[in-house]
Image (tube, rainbow, N blue to C red):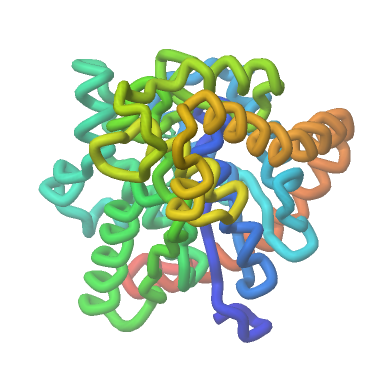
Amino acid sequence: MGNNNKKIAFSGIQPSGDLTIGNYLGALKNWVAIQDDFESYYCVVDLHALTVRQDPKELRLRTLKNLAIYIASGLDPKKNTLFIQSHVPAHSEATWLLNCFCYIGELSRMTQYKDKSQKIGESVSAGLFTYPVLMAADILLYNTDVVPVGVDQKQHIELARDLAVRFNNLYSPTFTIPEPYIADTGAKIMDLQEPEKKMSKSADNPNAYILILDPPNTIKKKISRAVTDDIGVVRYSEDQPGVSNLISILSTVTHMTPKDIEKKYEGMGYAQLKADVTDALVEELSPVQKTVKELLEDKTYLESIYKNSADKANYVANKTLRKMQRKLGLIPR
Ligand code: AQP
């Protein structure tokens, strides 16, 4: 519980690429939806982005851009603590401590690690392997009750829970055990070119994703190129992954159920569906894009948000870190 008796929510997105509608529909929109019900901490997880090679200038730019996107998507900086992960050193310190309680076997079973390391090959970093421990530290430092995420992050939250239980049992109750919070729709937006894979901001082919900041004509082009099938019926089913993905996107943006969408497009081909998905996305994203542009022109404002928030986040995180250190037998300064 936070000090206002609200439960605590924590989440973050890595600035490892420009944010996609997967990040928007699977994470950001849910953060906005629950902002009045929870005391919330949302950070731009820049340390996570370092698990794969980043251009320093690009990373700085994207970190600020992502903060602007959080605000433009509707997160009120007065209601939410919006900060940059590396501004709170306790995340790194707690990671080391938790690393000493995490088993190599547990980390080897993480599907995201398996997928990404396969793609990267030999030069895969130790950071990519221990990424879930940093994520556990992020979550546990804030006594988090819920972690609003897309489905792909569920396994990492389970590890955070296991580490919290392990630590609590070995010492004494220290951490709140966090729960994942996954919405019914939008929890897994798929790649537009290979709809069996989830949409990722770091995909090599730009036609695979739609960025939150993509202009209308780019959105139109990418949706028109989205892979469908030759069945020709608008149906939400496993054997039509491309069409089902378009239905999911439309459903999450318009709040129509997939069933209603199937009914609406009965007897129509995919062209109308694609045109309507394009319109819905353009309508949803245009105001966000406009606000992002304005915010990026006011760096002083953005700086005031992340600096004030870092003060609050440091205070809360350090309290938990000190507790961990004390219980482990480290001498306080
Ligand atoms: N395709 C998706 N559908 C629904 N939710 C998604 N999320 C990511 N992709 C989808 C959610 O966005 C949040 C932030 O994710 P992240 O950037 O921390 O890491 P990720 O899950 O690895 O996201 P990406 O876009 O795939 O990044 P890269 O390509 O850098 O690995 C999480 O809540 C995630 O569930």
Query: Ligand 1 is located in which of the four quadrants?
Result: top left
Q: Depth check: 308 or 325 in front? A: 308
* In the depicted structure, whether residue 234 falls above or below residue 40: above
* In the depicted structure, whether residue 306 falls above or below residue 3: above
In the image, residue 93 lies at what x, y percent? 43, 52
Is 322 displayed left or right of 306 in the figure?
A: left
Quarter of the image that includes the N terminus: bottom right
- Residue at figure coordinates x 80%, y 41% from the top left: 302
- Residue at figure coordinates x 28%, y 61% from the top left: 158
Residue at the front extreme, as displayed = 267
Residue at the left extreme, as displayed = 105
When asked about the image quadrant of residue 116, the answer is top left
- The answer to whether residue 171 is visible is yes
When asked about the image quadrant of residue 126, the answer is top left
Total labels: the figure holds: 0
- Residue at figure coordinates x 60%, y 60% from the top left: 41
Q: Depth check: 110 or 97 in front? A: 110
Is 272 displayed left or right of 235 in the figure?
A: right
* In the depicted structure, whether residue 68 falls above or below residue 274: below
In the image, residue 148 lies at what x, y percent? 49, 59
In the image, residue 111 lies at what x, y percent? 22, 41
- The answer to whether residue 48 is visible is no
Is 225 displayed left or right of 64 in the figure?
A: left
Residue at the bottom extreme, as displayed = 5
